[in-house]
Image (spheres, rainbow, N blue to C red):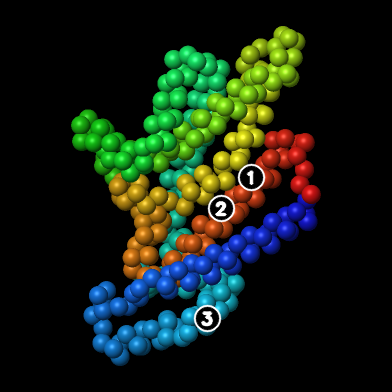
Amino acid sequence: MIRYLLRRIAGILGVLVFISLLTFALMHAIPGGPFDEDKMPLTPEQKANILRSFGLDRPLWQQYLIYAWNALHLDFGVSYQSPGETVIQLIARVWPVSLQLGAMALALAFAGGLTLGSLAAVRQNTWVDYLVTLLSTFGLIVPNFILGVLLILLFSDKFHLLPTGGWSGPRNWAMPVLAYALGPLGVVARYTRTSVIEALRADYVRTAYAKGLRGRVILRRHVLRNALIPLLTIMGPLVPDLLTGSLFVEVIFRVPGLGRFFVTSTLQRDYPMIMGLALLAAGAVSLTYLVTDLLYVAVDPRIRHA
């Protein structure tokens, strides 16, 4: 297991190096820069001084090597959008909001999807199954920004039950969490339904029924445990996607989180923030897949990592 972990950690480091190289090359291939005349009025001397102070007057290969060396020491530079803050300080200030939004959406998606998917499987080909399938399909095909607008029109504009945005309390959290969670909830519900139906048809389940065990006991101890294994596979992309923020949801509901920086950094050519956010997303995805593989062993002891 230790050798396996060391190999995976080395692989994660390789992925981060590749992502940093690719991101660095792409952001410098885009025309324009962070201190162009259309962004701020500067004299040629002022612009030259600013570029020199940020090291942007050096050749690109030197810029990357300097950035990589500093990143090894956890120095990711200063954000051009907020010159008084380093990239780490800026992420530490706004990411907790996105983490809170993502954690609530993740809890709703997995708890709701697991429950609805199990109900649909147990009540296969009934109105419950059809209703869950309809809700899952709706969550999958409707983008979260469209759902966000619909929620505002319904609960804020028509019934005046919830505020249109902000992040000051539970009444502000309800619509963004629902808009963010419905798509992943549909994915979890569909995977759960399929997995539970397959598990219910297994020989060990029929044996458990023959022994006289109650249906709830069989579902909890035998069916759901084995049905969780395929669900762990979809956790890989869902968890980091939810925990790193959503541009559309955060903008629509005025959530002061990390998601909006994914686009504003690109528009303003904030190179340190672009690199920092790219490495954050890549690291979150890589670590989630590693944790998912380790959870396979916890759920099914028959699985071993060499």
- Distance from label 3 to label 1 (Cα)? 36 Å
Residue at left offset 76%, top offset 47%: 305
Nearer to us: label 3 or label 2: 3
Q: Nearer the viewer, residue 174 or 58?
A: 58
Q: Nearer the viewer, residue 243 or 207?
A: 207
Residue linked to disc 2: 285
Circles 3 and 2: CB atoms closer than 8 Å = no
| Horizontal arrangement in the rendering, residue 142 relative to residue 223 (left or right) | left
**Coordinates of residue 126 in the picture (x, y in percent):** 47, 14
Say if 86 sits above or below 178 in the image.
below
Q: Nearer the viewer, residue 101 or 191?
A: 191
Residue at left offset 73%, top offset 9%: 210
Residue 168 seen in the current view: no
Q: Quadrant of residue 95?
A: bottom left
**Coordinates of residue 280 in the picture (x, y in percent):** 51, 60
User: Along the polypeptide, which appears first: circle 3 or circle 2?
Assistant: 3
Nearer to us: label 3 or label 1: 3
Going by the numbered disc 2, the residue's amino acid type is: Val
Going by the numbered disc 3, the residue's amino acid type is: Trp
Give the number of the disc on residue 61.
Answer: 3
- Distance from label 1 to label 2 (Cα)? 10 Å
Circles 1 and 2: CB atoms closer than 8 Å = no
Label 2 sits on a secondary structure element that is helix
Residue linked to disc 1: 292
Q: Nearer the viewer, residue 276 or 95?
A: 276
Q: How many numbered marks are there?
A: 3
**Coordinates of residue 47 in the picture (x, y in percent):** 32, 85
Residue at left offset 53%, top offset 72%: 75
